Amino acid sequence: MLKRASSEETLPVIAHFEVHRRAYLAPDGTVLRQPPDFAADTDLLISFYRAMVLARTFDLKAVSLQRTGRLGTYAVSLGQEAAAVGIASAMRPEDVLLPSYRDNGALIWRGVKLEDILTYWGGDERGSRSSGPGHDFPYCIPVASQAPHAAGVAYAFKFKKEPRVAVCLFGDGATSKGDLWEAMNFAGVHKLPVVFVANNNQWAISVPLKLQTAAQTLAQKAIAAGFYGEQVDGNDVIAVRAAAEEAMTAARAGQGPRFVEALTYRLSDHTTADDAARYRPPEEVQARWREEPIARLRAYLVSKQAWGKSQEEELAADCQRQVDAAVERYLATTPRPPETMFDHLYAELPTAYIGQREEVAGASHA
Ligand SMILES: Cc1ncc(C[n+]2csc(CCOP(=O)(O)OP(=O)(O)O)c2C)c(N)n1
Ligand SMILES: [Mg+2]
């Protein structure tokens, strides 16, 4: 609760705000409160589980490819699978996803081929061409710069009276950026159909949340922009899905933007170029492993007798097969010649670059 320093004079309260937190599953998979109706559909929950395990299998393989020199830098999403799947599964194909670099699980749910994700992280821009819905945006590396794009996409939907939603994914660090604030402010004023999702994984590279913001929650940042924000347990896929679905339904119905803060934890390094052990105590990470989303959903499914050892083994083998096949296709891709880096910068290449392009082409074909 924020208090005035001096309280000599009693001033009238002219506004009240509150921030709600949503959670259904405890870290051990037991039920905290009655889950929403869709959670009765165990097949749906199993599809979430399968997608989360696939994302994790893919992540682990991507790291080993990087470690053996066969992939560029990779942003691991270990521990954040529920947030990715909970959000993406609430979207319709015609909605538009504007992902950040860590949202592999969301892309996979949207139908992006695993080999395309590897192609992108292998340094080949052809991997950015979505093999999921063609209108989805590619990974965004510049922090928060996808937020104004999301507001623009949502503005177009409103302008064309299309019942579609833009879904913008970003991290806790992004909430300190002006671009995010400008996008939220604009979206609030124009009541745009956009859902802002903060994956609050507690860290922005080596900057912990408490140095990122003095605010008690990230969700409350929506209040300043005039729309509803809530916090969800981002390791509880049921909670994320419920919040996402509600937000998207509201946005589609013309009620304007919403903000979802998914509380989670980055269990891995920031990227393969980072060593988080230099700035995070191992005890903190160990404690967070006890809250991770996959074991939690598995425990819940097992308690419902909807999942068991044989399904788990079959799933592990199936995910490994899918990932291995994608890796094979990725490694068989012929790299593009280096001069193609000039090809998509301009509609017509300026004269100054024509010579440079020829020089690179000459060197690469020499
Ligand atoms: C505009 C911009 N500034 C700096 C960076 C370097 N950078 C890459 S990731 C990152 C931290 C982002 O943290 P957060 O938003 O919490 O996302 P997370 O990586 O935790 O998913 C920074 C500063 C960048 N990519 N873009
Ligand atoms: Mg972060």
Image: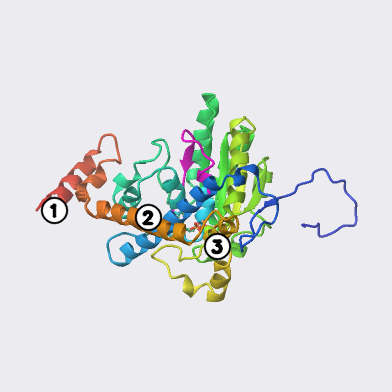
Q: Which residue is mark 1?
A: 363
On whether residue 294 falls in the magenta region, the answer is no
Q: Amino acid under label 2?
A: Asp
Which residue is depicted at the point 29% across and 34% down? 347
Which residue is depicted at the point 63% across and 40% down? 246
Q: Which residue lies most toward the top here?
A: 160
CA–CA distance between discs 1 and 3?
49 Å
- Name the foreground residue: 41 vs 324: 41
Indicate which label's residue lies in the foreground, 1 or 3: 3
Position of residue 256 in the picture relative to residue 67 (left or right): right
Residue 202, given in percent of the width and then of the height, sits at 57, 62
Few, some or many residues within 10 Å of mark 1 (<14, 14–19, 20+):
few
Q: Amino acid under label 3?
A: Glu
What's the magenta bit mostly, secondary-structure-wise? loop
Q: Amino acid under label 1?
A: Ala
- Name the foreground residue: 205 vs 359: 205
- Name the foreground residue: 176 vs 277: 277
| Total numbered badges shown on the rendered structure | 3
Residue 123 visible in image: no
Residue 35, given in percent of the width and then of the height, sits at 66, 49
On whether residue 98 falls in the magenta region, the answer is yes
